[in-house]
Image (cartoon, rainbow, N blue to C red):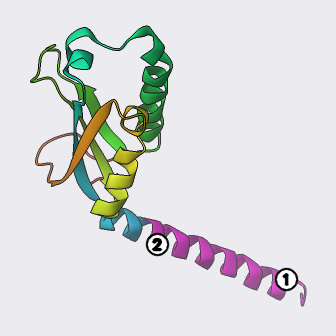
């Protein structure tokens, strides 16, 4: 009987620790905000003609980066317009704890790091859309 008491206390402590971690994770998600990144090609030829053959490894890395952000629940949407002129642009909407964190996420985009794209980051308020399955909140 005496062995059951410490075991029961350890089990209760584990349950409390798990609940505390879950509450902390929920609070962290609630603090996250949405940010939009507006991407533009530095060279108009990139928008007009598309990537050169030597740019293709970077383009693949770029797509993999956004696929990972999406799988991690950070990126809500990312893509680009289909026009091939000076008005072409790409966008990404991400969840982040701060504007600085969003700038870091967007600045780490491979095509931005390589200097082929520029990005401008804006705070964003999503009004319509699919809810976040983790929190039930709208994006």
**Local crowd at mark 1 within 10 Å, few (<14), some, or many (≥20)?**
few
Foreground residue among 103 and 125: 103
Residue 58: x %, y % from top left: 47, 24
Q: Is residue 16 magenta?
A: yes
Q: Which mark is residue 61?
A: none
The secondary structure that dominates the magenta segment is helix
**What residue does disc 1 label?**
4
Q: State the separation of the CA atoms marked 1 and 2.
A: 30 Å
**Would residue 40 appear left or right of 17 to someone viewing this image?**
left
Which one is in front, 4 or 56?
56
Q: Position of residue 125 (x, y in %)?
A: 14, 53
Check disc 2: other Cα within 10 Å, few if <14, some if 14-19, many if 20+.
Answer: few
Q: Position of residue 53 (x, y in %)?
A: 44, 9
Task: Give me the residue at 39% from left, 49% from top.
Answer: 105
Task: Name, please, the residue furthest toward the bottom.
Answer: 2
Would residue 133 be visible to someone looking at this image? Answer: no
Task: Using the image, determine if residue 102 lies above or below residue 118.
Answer: below
Residue 61 relative to residue 32: left or right: right
Residue that carries the numbered disc 2 in the rendered image? 24
Q: Where residue 130 appears, x then y in whole percent?
A: 23, 40
Kind of element beneath mark 1: helix
Identify which residue is drawn at 43% across, 40% down: 69
Foreground residue, 135 or 42?
42
Which residue is painted at 90% across and 85% down in the image?
Answer: 3
Q: Earlier in the sequence, mark 1 or mark 2?
A: 1
Splitting the image into 4 quarters, where does residue 42 fall? Answer: top left
Please tell me which residue is depicted at 47% across the width and 21% down the height of the picture.
60
Which span of residues is magenta-colored? Answer: 1-25
Q: Magenta stretch: residue 12 in it?
A: yes
Q: Is residue 10 left or right of residue 127?
A: right
């Amino acid at each position: 009987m005496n062995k059951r008491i410490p075991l029961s206390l350890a089990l209760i402590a584990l349950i409390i620790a798990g609940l505390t971690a879950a509450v902390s994770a929920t609070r962290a998600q609630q603090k996250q905000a949405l940010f939009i990144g507006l991407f533009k090609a530095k060279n108009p030829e990139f928008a007009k003609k598309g990537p050169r053959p030597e740019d293709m490894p970077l383009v693949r890395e770029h797509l993999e980066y956004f696929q990972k952000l999406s799988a991690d629940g950070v990126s809500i949407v990312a893509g680009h317009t289909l026009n091939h002129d000076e008005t072409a642009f790409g966008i990404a909407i991400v969840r982040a704890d701060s504007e600085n964190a969003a700038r870091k996420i967007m600045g780490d985009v491979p095509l931005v790091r390589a200097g082929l794209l520029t990005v401008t980051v804006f705070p964003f308020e999503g009004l319509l859309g699919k809810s976040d399955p983790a929190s039930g909140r709208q994006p």
